[in-house]
Amino acid sequence: MTQMLTLPAVAQIGTSREDLIALRVTGGIDAEQMDALASFLNSVFDERDTVDLLIVFDRYIPAAPADTFDWDAIKAWFRADGNLRRYIVVGDGAHVNELLDGLSSILPVTPEIFDEELSAWRALDAHATAPGSV
């Protein structure tokens, strides 16, 4: 089983479902963290046929604009084809939309966007357990 992800601006949230990966973004994600995140998710995809992905944006302040990432390089590093069932995002604002625009070139499914975290958990029929839980 893949070890829990903890980066300076991204922490994995424990969930009530084995096939759900939940992440809380608390700060700017730079290219190094994006590479680490891609590597982590690829490990998850190696272990499981399909997963749902929940990303919760808290107090997100971009360290670098999303257009400074080398999205082609990140896409080559990140392989979600066939493994990602649902992709749910909690958050709003220009900074979230910038990052989602970049991620949409990588992820094979369209994100479902929620304003409230509780609504997203309900849509996934799951709840946070720990760490990084609500």
Image (cartoon, rainbow, N blue to C red):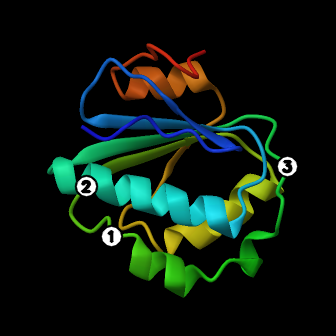
Left or right: 117 as drawn, with respect to 124: right
Q: Which residue is mark 2?
A: 45
Where residue 127 sits in the image (x, y, percent)?
42, 16
Instruction: Name the residue rendered at 74%, 44% in the picture.
Output: 92
Q: Give the mark, 2 or 1, whose residue is nearer the N terminus.
A: 2
Where residue 112 sits in the image (x, y, percent)?
48, 47
Q: Secondary structure at mark 1?
A: loop
Check disc 3: other Cα within 10 Å, few if <14, some if 14-19, many if 20+. Answer: some
Front in this rendered view, residue 70 or 113:
70
Q: What amino acid is at disc 2?
A: Phe
Q: Give the mark, 3 or 1, whose residue is nearer the N terminus.
A: 3
Instruction: Name the residue rendered at 79%, 56% in the picture.
Output: 95
Tell me where residue 107 sits by quadrant: bottom left
Q: Tell me, yes or no, if residue 84 can be seen here.
A: no
Q: Quadrant of the N terminus?
A: top left
Q: Secondary structure at mark 3?
A: loop
Left or right: 60 as drawn, with respect to 53: right
Q: What amino acid is at disc 1?
A: Arg
CA distance for labels 3 and 1: 26 Å
Front in this rendered view, residue 100 or 20:
20
Q: Which residue is mark 3?
A: 61
Left or right: 34 as drawn, with respect to 30: left
Instruction: Name the residue rendered at 67%, 62% in the picture.
Output: 99
Check whether the beta carbons of the residues at disc 2 and disc 1 lie within 8 A of each other: yes
Q: Which residue is mark 1?
A: 79
